[in-house]
Amino acid sequence: MNQATVLAQVARSFADRPALSLGTEPLCDYAGFADRVARLAGGLRDLGLRDGDRVALVMKNCPAFWESLYAIWHAGFAAVPVNAKLHPKEHAFILENSGSRVCLATPELAAALAAIRGELPSLNHLLATDGPDYAALGAGKPAPLAETRPTDLAWLFYTSGTTGRPKGAMLSHRNLNSMVMNYFGDVDTVLPDDSIVHAAPMSHGSGLYGLPHVAKAANTVVPVSGGFDVAETLALIERWPGTSFFFAPTMVTRLITAPNIDRADLANLKTIVYGGAPMYLEDVKRALALLGPKLVQIYGQGEAPMTITGLPKHIFTDTDHPRYEARIGSTGFPRTDVEVRVVDERGAEMPVGEPGEVICRGDVVMEGYWNNPEATASALRDGWLWTGDVGTFDADGFLTLKDRSKDVIISGGTNIYPREVEEVLLRHPAVLEAAVIGRAHPDWGEEVVAFVRPHPGRTVAQEELDALCLDNIARFKRPKAYLLVDDLPKNNYGKILKTELRKLAAPATD
């Protein structure tokens, strides 16, 4: 089922329930939300788009994201939500790679894209959400709901990989429906009196978990700041009943270490779903002590959105279990409608306790990578998604992740792929080799560190490398340290040994 159909049905049954709110103020009810979506869909169709065309959303968190997202589906198109924190050149690559004919963007991001419009030949329309063209989209007649098939593309989720270029995971309407139903089955119930506050980027996990809340006529709340501010978050919890969040672990840590958190009014806090990176056991315990049994952990990928394994609330409260600490330090057990295995390189299942690659299959697994048959063939084999993550199952079927075979760095809950940064550093004429790794950081989980080997007889200033990165990739991806070396450790096949580099880059201890 098209998620826009879900919205239309909910709007009939719960027309007067608050649908969208900005901060503490309601903006519209479900009847108004559905009408706005239908009119925006009509405006998009008037732009000459055809069924299945891609429409990009390059937006910071704002209410316009939600009306635009559902309007795209209502009209029969596919949405391409893009991380607002990326560099304009990275935005441009995604827009061109996806073949997006229309881009809806918040004002400052629209201005940045307008400056490089010449690099976007396939883009027919760039509309700022504060401009007259966007206003005109919703000024006409409502469009009828488009007919879609379960396998039609709904959300093109760009997730970087080891190739150094982002890949578009094709999420169909069936994938999104599976994720939504899995939320109700394995994560939480949702009622019309509930709310979800989007303090994390809506182009990723928070946005995906917004869908089950719309499906049950809950209130979608966007903070005025558009992001995560502890004081604002606490005020929104106090304002809205049945409040849920999707947080990166670092956001949970910031919340529970805030001054006077033990005196905050958390009566309305219902659920914090956290994922994207491990959370330290002591932080989990402290969060449970301060917040109560409100935590749910999930493990998933853009290729299997939010849905591979999970730890529901009742596991966190089962403190008498003899393996309690090991369980709440794991990523949980397979979700209801997903099969999960740990296998060797040939696909043979590993014994309990033995590490291997995590693979999964189910209706939530993507259709493949957009225009990338080689990557699709590598990731999808005989119906199984090979995640690239290494983990072990215990005797009770709880999965613990051991490593990330793709060397992804997770900083503040955001994935950073080393090769993207390495390729930028190698553009400097004085750089012979570069290797990027993650170093432990007390607040962000990991920080980016680059080892750089100049050409013999050449020198390179760290300021030049920093400027190069800032000109080509998002600020959050740039290294926090550049370590100049005469050589890089390699194995007999010439492969750089990042395990050795991690030892060299490890923070000094007393």
Image (cartoon, rainbow, N blue to C red):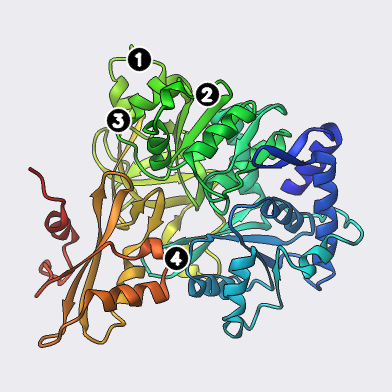
Asked whether the residues under the numbered discs 4 and 2 touch, taking CB atoms below 8 Å apart as contact, a structural biologist would say no
317 is higher (above) or lower (below) than 137: above
- Local packing at callout 1 (Cα closer than 10 Å; few below 14, some 14-19, many 20+) is few
- Local packing at callout 4 (Cα closer than 10 Å; few below 14, some 14-19, many 20+) is some
Q: Amino acid at mark 4?
A: Ala
Question: Residue at label 4?
Answer: 375
Q: Which residue: 53% across, 28% down?
A: 271
Using the numbered discs, state the Cα–Cα distance from disc 1 to disc 3 in whole angstroms: 13 Å
Lower position in the chain sequence, tag 2 or tag 3:
2
Question: Comparing marks 4 and 2, which lies closer to the viewer?
Answer: 2
Q: On residue 319, which mark appears? A: 1
Q: Amino acid at mark 2?
A: Leu
Lower position in the chain sequence, tag 1 or tag 3:
3
Q: For the residue labelled by badge 2, is the local secondary structure a helix, a strand or a loop?
A: loop
174 is higher (above) or lower (below) than 89: above
Left or right: residue 325 compared with residue 156: left
Q: Quadrant of the C terminus?
A: top left
Question: Residue at label 2?
Answer: 266
Residue that sits furthest to the top in the current view: 320
Using the numbered discs, state the Cα–Cα distance from disc 4 to disc 3 in whole angstroms: 35 Å
Question: Comparing marks 4 and 1, which lies closer to the viewer?
Answer: 1
100 or 148, which is in the foreground?
A: 100
Question: Residue at label 3?
Answer: 281
